[in-house]
Amino acid sequence: MESFNVVETLQPAERALFWVGALTTASLTLWLLYKILTGFRIWVIGNGDLLSPKLGKWAVVTGATDGIGKSYAEELARRGFSMMLISRSQEKLDDVAKSLESMYNVETKTIAVDFGHNDIYTKIEKGLSGLEIGVLVNNVGISYPYPEFFLHIANLENFIDNMINVNITSVCQMTRLVLPRMESREKGVILNISSASGMFPVPLLTIYSSTKAFVDFFSRGLQAEYRCKGIIIQVRCVL
């Protein structure tokens, strides 16, 4: 009776599995290295030549008086853009404008509007008239005062209208006002600020997370439409 050698039988399979494992490890290592180098290029080195007034003299930032919006306004002014600041409080707008003029020696303009209303865009359109806009940052946004069940939200009807107007309508309408001029010049950057809350459903913040999901998908769809026109449209999902 012929003996059965288990070792010899399994050797071909062992070699095959070794190479499958080696190739998988190499692929994952290369992928990880690519991600690290890409992150280093974007977040450490950056691309100062891309984001410069060569895109257009003016940068527009909504929600520009606090937090993320103010930080973007400061960075864009540092890069040499003249700044159009749009927010609700004229007093805060004046303070930020004076600070940018003093620190970076740039021209500033302001428009005070409440993005919770829909009748503001004629005023904004007039304020933007004649400006060569290279960058638009759609930053303005609101969230819940505290997590809450949908039907327990105080003044729910107005809450819904206000949340949609500020978080969704503002992005669409500001893009409508600015994008045609970028398209005609075949250059420009639109940056829309979303949230990690828009990446998955967030109970008790349901309306907010849904509006931020819209911003994400709107941005990605618009980039697919206008990439060939030389326009960059990005979304940032901040925490």
Image (cartoon, rainbow, N blue to C red):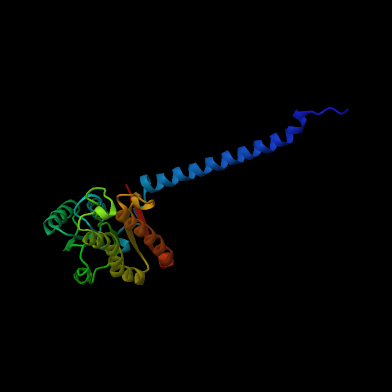
Q: Residue farthest to the left? A: 91
Q: Quadrant of residue 120?
A: bottom left
Q: Relative to residue 41, is residue 157 depicted above or below?
A: below
Whether residue 51 appears in this view of the structure is no
Residue 235 position within the rendered picture, expressed as x and y whole percent measured from the top left: 36, 56
At 12% from the left edge and 59% from the top edge, which residue is drawn?
A: 90
Query: Could you say where residue 40 lies in the image, as x and y percent from the top left?
Result: 40, 44
The answer to which of 143 and 121 lies nearer the viewer is: 143
The relative height of residue 54 versus residue 181 in the rendered view (above or below) is: above
Q: Quadrant of the N terminus?
A: top right
35 sits to left or right of 129 = right
> Residue 23's x, y, as percent?
61, 41
Q: Residue furthest right?
A: 1
The answer to whether residue 91 of the structure is visible from this angle is yes
Nearer to me, 59 or 125: 125
Residue 65 image offset from top left, x and y in percent: 19, 54
Quarter-wise, where is residue 5 in the image? top right
Q: Nearer the viewer, residue 222 or 167?
A: 167
Please tell me which residue is depicted at 37% across the width and 57% down the height of the picture: 216
Which of the 4 image quadrants contains residue 180?
Answer: bottom left
Left or right: 31, with 107 as reference point: right
Count the marks: how many? 0
Asked if 33 appears above or below 208 in the picture, the reply is above
